[in-house]
Amino acid sequence: MKNDFSTNESWSLKMDEVDDLKRFKERFYLIEDAIYMDGNSLGLMSVDAENSLLRVVKEWKTLGINGWMGGDTPWFYYPEMLAGRLAGLIGAEKDEVMVHSSTTVNLHLLLATFYRPEGKRTKILMDNLTFPSDRYAVESFMKTKGYNPEDHLVIFESADGKTLDENAISEAMNEEIAVILLPSVLYRSGQLLDMKSLTEKAHEKGILIGFDCAHSIGAVPHRFKEYGPDFAFWCNYKYVNNGPGGTGGFYINRRHFDREVGLAGWYGVEKEKQFDLENEFHQNHSAGGWQIGTSHMLSMAPLEGSLKLYEEAGALRLRDKSLKLTAYMMFLIEELLSPYGFSIATPKEEKRRGGHVALEHEDAVRINEALKEKGVVPDFRPPNIIRLAPVPLYTSYHDVWKVVSKVKEIYEKGEYKNYDKKRGTVA
């Protein structure tokens, strides 16, 4: 693929001319005089997301409580509607998905169901590169079960500090492991794990396995019906553009619908019985049964408009453009930046990378700050990574060219030296 690219600016402009997805950029509110490369942390607002949010706000304004059954989509059934549409991004059945709460809260409710220590199987297997919040949740939840994480949490260590070897992880699976929890895409390096292979190996050894898909949903089309993991969870405010702190989601394989939920609440009752308000918990035998409380309507509403964009653009077409954008960015980094000590932590193989590129440099924190002053919105992850996410819905090939060119200019002119070796409060 390298031979298809050019370092000339004109090449990027020609690619934009023939890009059949370029029209979607016009439906986003772009930050004035800036190139947005941080969609892997928070996606931009679209006109469509704004419209669906404002419609629900208007329903609240004009209908009050009658919005629960009188809204354009009755609020009472709103999470099921969104979940059914979201299921297409992960290749799951509609009733296996739910839009609910936040990422870490969803992990807690999934652990309450799937982590049931018994006999030898008392341990959870994780990796040392996963997003720390997942580890906080697992360790704290283990303690509620009376298990010391020092003895019952198995941490698989990366050999290079950037990526994970799936075969080596499989070798760590043993008869003491009850649950495996891994990221689908590593939040620093952007490595995409082989979820199908890992799930098959886990199930061969009688182990339940789940994935944190926060850095893959909306960037990588999944096929959960084929992979067969036991559970998954994610946020919707990164590539899915649901807005800051927007309601998250989770997946439960239908073979577990008869399991007793670990954390029960009234919204997990069978829909037709919810307002019977009986003291007996009549579990909804779908992913909806794992809901705890009332739908967060104003945090869900932008997702409706955002999913409209995905349905129009097509997840496979978006993935194809994403791969081309990240490959082009890596080509430019190697051609223009490698002489200055820059390197790439993201795997080069298409099947092993998600939607962002991890640019490494010993002065990454200062270069990151200088990029902001140059009108680029990146993010920094310690100790030495600048994450750049060319989101296909609103990023052009010319945007990529300009960003790499700005990094080169910052380094050649020594502009980064004007900044402290200290990250901001929000990196």
Image (cartoon, rainbow, N blue to C red):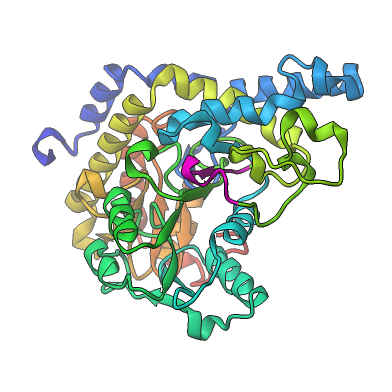
- Can you say which quadrant of the picture contains the N terminus? top left
- The picture quadrant where one finds residue 321 is top left
Query: Relative to 400, is 182 on the left or the right?
Result: right
Q: Is residue 353 magenta?
A: no
Q: Residue at x 58, y 70 (%)?
A: 136
Q: Residue at x 63, y 52 (%)?
A: 260
- Say if 275 sits above or below 26 in the image: below
Q: Is residue 250 magenta?
A: yes
Query: Relative to 331, is 135 on the left or the right?
Result: right
Q: Is residue 234 visible?
A: yes
Q: Residue at x 53, y 25 (%)?
A: 85
The spot of residue 354 in percent (x, y) is 34, 46
The spot of residue 160 in percent (x, y) is 27, 72
Query: Relative to 407, is 106 on the left or the right?
Result: right
- Can you say which quadrant of the picture contains the C terminus? bottom right
Q: Is residue 58 visible?
A: no
Query: Relative to 28, is 176 on the left or the right?
Result: left
Region of the chain picked out in magenta, as a range: 248-259
Say which of 20 and 331 sits in front: 20
Say which of 167 and 328 sits in front: 167
The spot of residue 69 in percent (x, y) is 81, 19
